[in-house]
């Protein structure tokens, strides 16, 4: 429209809130999250080899195929280009042991997408984190492969750990298992450093805390995630750490860093307001500790996040911001 | 007691139980035994046949005695009638099919408390004569039987990789499907299929979900 043409009457735009848009689209956010996840994948590739990339591709493919099929069947606009299915696939692959048969992540990704997102109505309607449901379903479906197919890292001191992760060994063997692991490390006290850097057995995306923090720093810098949820999760787990024989491994091992920064901060399944987010995070941290210390599994972050996902609508309701009125009274 | 009402056509009575008011997938009744038993087709088939026989006999006997019982105590009387047929069924199955009975015996006894049977006696037997009660009971029983066999076949095929115990799946089965959670997924999926067929046939979906439990 040229400047000579003047619209006779200004159109009145009527819509319900929110009225202030950030200018950032879902697709931009999701692809930035995917970008932030890449360092951890690169690290896993370096430590465990090419098989990691095959597993990740298989998982992404499962999610993408299911997303495409669900959108076609529901006759919805395809939400493939926004990258959310790719993100779910990436995150699901990150929670899997690197030695798992390559076709299993494909099945897991499809199950996760269909049963978590598809039947609830697609993007933005899921109750649970898609990747975590995928992992939980795979735990129930392939229990042996999901808990035994660990690979020994290509470098680092922790070499006696191909049968189980360090957390699992400590869970089973207690102090004796810990002493054995510590004895295998030549310079004694450096075990925490191996864990921090990522030279240990574990799921694909969880092994390197540094790489996860690198991605998380990018998301924090871009304003995509805030620190309320991750920090309160870490505080919650830290409160439970004294009950463990090895608090530093307790904090650095397992999937809490991946879960705290990338899973629990999912917009759809986490509360909106800071106070709700803090309670959400503390709940996850404490539940993780409870499952780890007294439950049947060595790691509990997956189930802890899913349990708190259920509470998200309630937390949103309890911490609803007060409406602003002229005299400050609640309307 | 009021006189018997004229019965609906036989096809209506049969289809009502099989599809429109299918006990499991439309009325959502007896879901607990349905989930527990359908880990294999054989088990589902056995409980389904037991329910079919008990439903038909209970409906018919309920219709026979409805004029001579005090309406105030009809529920206990109906329950006793069901219990008679269930006991007979239980003994027959224990005597002749003891291997499957080991697995589903508990649920055969529970048929006494299946909501679908007493609700058909209340809704249908109280108002109709013996012959329509046979068709209505047959339709409801077949609906239950078909439901259990469908769910059982799906779960056994995907969860154990076999049908009637014969392995046919070439790949590793999905253990999740035979777990209780998989039972709920299966029944939910078949329920969705029933709703989908219903919509295709021009019916509108009810706005609320689910039904009674039992």
Image (spheres, coloured by chain):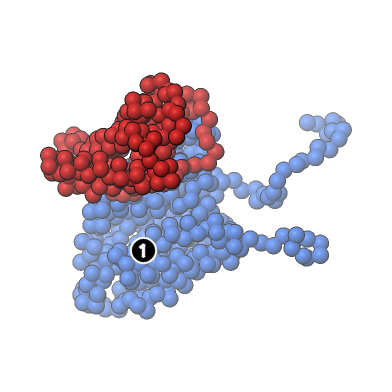
Chain colours: A blue, B red
Which of these two is toward me, B207 or B134? B134
> How dense is the environment of label 1, judged by Cα within 10 Å: few (below 14), some, or many (20 and up)?
many
Which of these two is toward me, A283 or A123? A283
Q: Is residue A288 visible?
A: yes
Q: Quadrant of residue B64 in the image?
A: top left
Which residue sits at x=26%, y=78%? A188
- A87, above or below A257, in the image: above
Which residue sits at x=20%, y=66%? A160
Please state the horizontal and vertical placement of residue A17, each as a whole percent of the image: 69, 49
- A39, above or below A66, in the image: below
Q: Chain of mark 1?
A: A
**Left or right side of A176 for B138:** right
Q: Quadrant of residue B170 in the image?
A: top left
- Mark 1 highlights which residue? A300
Is label 1 in a helix, a strand or a loop?
A: loop
Residue placed furthest toward the front: B68
**Left or right side of A192 for A34:** right
**Left or right side of A118 for A94:** left
Total labels: the figure holds 1
Which residue sits at x=26%, y=57%? A147
Which of these two is toward me, A109 or B143? B143
Please state the horizontal and vertical placement of residue A146, each as a whole percent of the image: 27, 54
Pick the quarter of the image with the N terminus of chain B. top left
Please state the horizontal and vertical placement of residue B39, each as a whole percent of the image: 25, 43
Which residue sits at x=81%, y=65%? A327
Please state the horizontal and vertical placement of residue B110, each as a whole percent of the image: 28, 48
């Amino acid at each position: 429209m040229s400047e000579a043409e003047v619209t006779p009457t200004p159109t009145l735009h009527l819509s319900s809130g929110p009225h202030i848009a950030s200018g950032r689209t879902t697709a931009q956010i999701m692809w930035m999250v995917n970008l932030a996840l890449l360092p951890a994948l690169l690290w896993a590739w370096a430590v465990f080899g090419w098989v990691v990339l095959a597993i990740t591709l298989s998982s992404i493919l499962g999610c993408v195929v299911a997303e495409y099929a669900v959108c076609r069947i529901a006759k919805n606009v395809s939400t493939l280009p926004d990258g959310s299915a790719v993100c779910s696939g990436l995150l699901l692959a990150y929670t899997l042991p690197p030695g798992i048969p390559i076709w299993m992540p494909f099945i897991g990704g499809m199950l996760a997408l269909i049963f978590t997102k598809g039947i609830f109505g697609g993007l933005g309607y899921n109750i649970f984190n898609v990747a975590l449901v995928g992992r939980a379903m795979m735990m129930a479906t392939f229990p042996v492969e999901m808990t035994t197919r660990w690979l020994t890292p290509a470098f680092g001191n922790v070499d006696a750990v191909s049968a189980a992760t360090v957390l699992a060994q400590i869970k089973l063997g207690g102090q004796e298992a810990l002493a054995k692991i510590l004895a295998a490390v030549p310079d004694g006290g450096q075990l925490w450093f191996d864990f921090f850097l990522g030279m240990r057995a574990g799921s694909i995306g969880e092994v390197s805390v540094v790489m996860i923090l690198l991605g998380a720093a990018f998301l924090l810098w871009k304003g995509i995630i805030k620190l309320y949820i991750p920090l309160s999760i870490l505080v919650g787990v830290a409160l439970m750490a004294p009950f463990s024989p090895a608090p530093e491994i307790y904090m650095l091992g397992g999937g809490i860093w991946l879960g705290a920064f990338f899973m629990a901060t999912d917009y759809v399944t986490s509360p909106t307001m800071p106070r709700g987010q803090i309670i959400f995070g503390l709940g996850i941290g404490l539940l993780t500790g409870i499952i780890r210390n007294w439950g049947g599994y060595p790691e509990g972050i997956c189930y802890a996040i899913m349990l708190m996902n259920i509470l998200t609508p309630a937390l949103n309701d309890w911490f609803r911001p007060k409406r602003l009125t002229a005299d400050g009274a609640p309307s | 007691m009021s006189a018997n009402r004229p019965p609906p056509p036989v096809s209506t009575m049969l289809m009502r139980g099989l599809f429109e008011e299918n006990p499991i997938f439309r009325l959502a009744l007896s879901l607990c035994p349905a989930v527990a038993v359908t880990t294999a087709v054989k088990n589902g088939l056995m409980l389904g046949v037991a329910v079919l026989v008990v439903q038909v006999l209970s409906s018919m006997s309920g219709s026979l005695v409805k004029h001579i019982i005090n309406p105030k105590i009809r529920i206990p009387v109906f329950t006793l009638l069901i219990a008679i047929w269930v006991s007979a069924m239980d003994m027959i199955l224990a005597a002749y099919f003891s291997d499957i009975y080991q697995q589903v015996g508990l649920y055969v006894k529970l048929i006494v408390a299946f909501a679908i049977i007493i609700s058909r006696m209340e809704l249908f037997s109280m108002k109709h004569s013996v012959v329509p009660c046979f068709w209505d009971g047959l339709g409801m029983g077949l609906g239950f039987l078909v439901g259990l066999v469908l769910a059982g076949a799906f779960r056994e095929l995907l969860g154990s990789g076999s049908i009637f115990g014969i392995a046919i799946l070439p790949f590793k089965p999905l253990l999740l499907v035979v777990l209780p959670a998989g039972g709920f997924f299966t029944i939910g999926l078949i329920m969705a299929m029933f709703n989908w067929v219903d919509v295709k046939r021009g019916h509108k979906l009810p706005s609320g979900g689910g039904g009674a439990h039992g």
